Each structure stands twice: as structure tokens, then as C-alpha cells.
């Protein structure tokens, strides 16, 4: 199992060593921060959205598949008043915008956009990952990722761009084409692109269907044009030659609650299940959109393979 994550003694790549891992992560993160700042993310005030408040209200009501009557009843106003708001005959108060945003389950970014469109200041700040006020939160994220080792774990932003990763996750990127690793690194592109992990994913059709379904739901819920474009791009990637057929419905190995990632590492196929974690009470847009994805062994063989490097490391550690 010497090829597993490159962790065996004498086979640890330079960039995987602890002192160099920090430099790799810092380089990736700094580029992500730079891109986010270029897009105007590190600010407390938002630019005026291109759509008006009536337009946004209609769009979100349609996206949530609510009739005027249903939304009005849930928000505690008359259908007539809601109709006037949607056609611009009535102007909402700040409290009314917040009430409608609550009923429409708007994410913090979209809530800000609706407030600004109605002529009010945004409710929630958005700061870059390196902002001093986020230092404590980012330290917590780092501890979560490090604590998950020797299993892979990573943190991504709203558009699935890599923010942080632990050493096992970075090790899986070995052999990926350089153009896919130019920051910001999009982990879904890395996963499905022919120059990425695609040729090594043994259940590519199943894994791609799973990712596209999840991403499609995110696009529908968020209304994010970048996510929609990402769905289209990923769906257009060619299927690797020799990819096995998608499993027959009703023969799910994991009771319908998870889809494994079967990844060829060296001459061994490792099988992972993943869970995602978000900060539901975050008071910053960046943190509210940050997702931590942790991978767990999906079978005994993978569990044993993942445990071997950790056990070897423990044996070599000095006593005391």
C-alpha cells in the first residue's frame, strides 16, 4: 500500500510534508482570496443589483413554486398587497423585505440583494477568508480538516472552489493536469474532467450523475448563474473510455442514502463515502456559503488502507 496517499516512510512527496503543505494551501487560498476580491466580495456594501425588487420577488416566488396566494398567506399579508409589490405599485418596508426573504428561504447573499434592490442597506457582511475577523473561524475549519486525517477532507466556497484541504486530500491530486490545479481550483472540475480524476474513477457514470443531481438542486435553490454554467460544463465532459454502466435502479449498495466514490490510487481501488457540513448560524456570507466535505471509507478494505499509514506513523513516533 505504499502508493496510498504517498504517506509511507520514504515516499512522502515534498509538497505533502507538513512544513510545505502550509505553503501549498496558503498559495491556493491567497489566489482564491485575490479572485474573490476582484469580484467585489470583500466588502460590507453591495452594488445595486441589475434586477429590481419586483423582478427579484417574482423570480424567487417562481423558483420556490409558490403562488401569490400561498406566499401572501405565509408572509402574513394580503394577496392584493403582494401583487402590488410584484408590479411596483407598492414599496416594501425593510421589515417586509426580511419577512418575504424568510418565507422564500433566501440565502444570505440573495437576501442582501433583495434588500439593496428595495433601497435598503445589506443585512450581512461578506469578508474574504483572510480578513482578521474571520481568523478564528478559519482556524476552526483548519482544525476540522486536520482532525479528519488520515482521511481526506476539504473546504470549498459556494462555487466549489477549493479554500482549504488536508494533506490526504491534496495527495489525491497527484497526476492532475496543471491547468486544473491553477487557482482557483474547482474540485468538481478536477473530479470529472478527462485531465483530472475522471480516468481513475471506477464508477464514473454513477459518480457524475450524483454530482450533477446535487449541483442541479443547488442551482435551482440559489439561482446562481455560475452554478448553472458549471452544471452545463460538467455535463458536457466526455465519459472516459471503458467506464462501466450506471448501476440498475433498486440495487443500491448503500440503502439509497449515499453514492460512493471509487477511486483508483496506484493499483488499489479505494471506496469513499462523503458528508458535507455547513455553518448554519454564520453571520458572514462567505462563512455561510463555506462547505466542508469529509470522506470516509466505504468498505473494510479502504478503512484498512487508510489506517495503515497512521499506524506506521504512530509506531515511528518517539515515546513520551
Image (cartoon, rainbow, N blue to C red):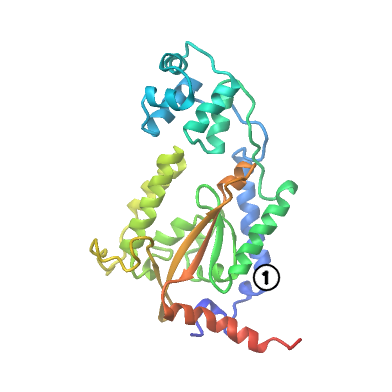
Q: Residue furthest top?
A: 89
Expressed as whole percent of the image width and height from the top left, the position of residue 39 reads 59, 39
Nearer-the-camera pick, 126 or 62? 62
Q: Is residue 86 left or right of residue 5?
A: left
Q: Residues within 10 Å of mark 1 (few under 14, many from 20)?
A: few
Nearer-the-camera pick, 189 or 250? 250
Q: Is residue 286 left or right of residue 63?
A: right
Task: Locate the C terminus by quadrant.
Answer: bottom right
Which residue matches tag 1?
Answer: 20
Residue 32 to residue 99: above or below: below
Residue 19 to residue 291: above or below: below
Q: Is residue 238 left or right of residue 183?
A: left
Q: Quadrant of residue 124?
A: top right
Question: Which residue is at a point 33% across and 61% down the rendered structure image?
Answer: 256
Question: Which residue is at a point 55% across and 61% down the rendered structure image?
Answer: 154
Whether residue 47 is visible: yes
Residue 298 to residue 126: above or below: below
Residue 150 to residue 255: above or below: below
Expressed as whole percent of the image width and height from the top left, the position of residue 11 reads 58, 83
Expressed as whole percent of the image width and height from the top left, the position of residue 64 reads 40, 34
Expressed as whole percent of the image width and height from the top left, the position of residue 173 reads 51, 68
Nearer-the-camera pick, 45 or 80? 80
Whether residue 10 is visible: no
**Dot 1: element:** helix
Amino acid at each position: 500500500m505504499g502508493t496510498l496517499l504517498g504517506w509511507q516512510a520514504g515516499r512522502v512527496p515534498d509538497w505533502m510534508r507538513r512544513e510545505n503543505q502550509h505553503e501549498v494551501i496558503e498559495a491556493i487560498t491567497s489566489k482564491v482570496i485575490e479572485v474573490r476580491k476582484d469580484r467585489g466580495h470583500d466588502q460590507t456594501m453591495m452594488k445595486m443589483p441589475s434586477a429590481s425588487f419586483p423582478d427579484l420577488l417574482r423570480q424567487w416566488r417562481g423558483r420556490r413554486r409558490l403562488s401569490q396566494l400561498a406566499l401572501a398567506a405565509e408572509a402574513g399579508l394580503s394577496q392584493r398587497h403582494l401583487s402590488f409589490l410584484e408590479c411596483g405599485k407598492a414599496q416594501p418596508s425593510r421589515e417586509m423585505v426580511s419577512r418575504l426573504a424568510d418565507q422564500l428561504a433566501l440565502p444570505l447573499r440573495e437576501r442582501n440583494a433583495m434588500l439593496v434592490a428595495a433601497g435598503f442597506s445589506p443585512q450581512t457582511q461578506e469578508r474574504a477568508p483572510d480578513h482578521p475577523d474571520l481568523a478564528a473561524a478559519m482556524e476552526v475549519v483548519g482544525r476540522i480538516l486536520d482532525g479528519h486525517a488520515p482521511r481526506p477532507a476539504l473546504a470549498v466556497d459556494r462555487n466549489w472552489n477549493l479554500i482549504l484541504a488536508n494533506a490526504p486530500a491534496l495527495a489525491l491530486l497527484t497526476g492532475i493536469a496543471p491547468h486544473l490545479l491553477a487557482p482557483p481550483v474547482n474540485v468538481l472540475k478536477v473530479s470529472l474532467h478527462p485531465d483530472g480524476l475522471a480516468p481513475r474513477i471506477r464508477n464514473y457514470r454513477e459518480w457524475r450523475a450524483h454530482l450533477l443531481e446535487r449541483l442541479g438542486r443547488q442551482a435551482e435553490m440559489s439561482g446562481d448563474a455560475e452554478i448553472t454554467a458549471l452544471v452545463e460544463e460538467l455535463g458536457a465532459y466526455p465519459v472516459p473510455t471503458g467506464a462501466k454502466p450506471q448501476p440498475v435502479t433498486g440495487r443500491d449498495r448503500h440503502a439509497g442514502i449515499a453514492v460512493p466514490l471509487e477511486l483508483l490510487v496506484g493499483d488499489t481501488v479505494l471506496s469513499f463515502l462523503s458528508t458535507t457540513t455547513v455553518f448554519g448560524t454564520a453571520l458572514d456570507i462567505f462563512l455561510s456559503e463555506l462547505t466542508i466535505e469529509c470522506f470516509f471509507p466505504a468498505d473494510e478494505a479502504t478503512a484498512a488502507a487508510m489506517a495503515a499509514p497512521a499506524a506506521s506513523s504512530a509506531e515511528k513516533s518517539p515515546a513520551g
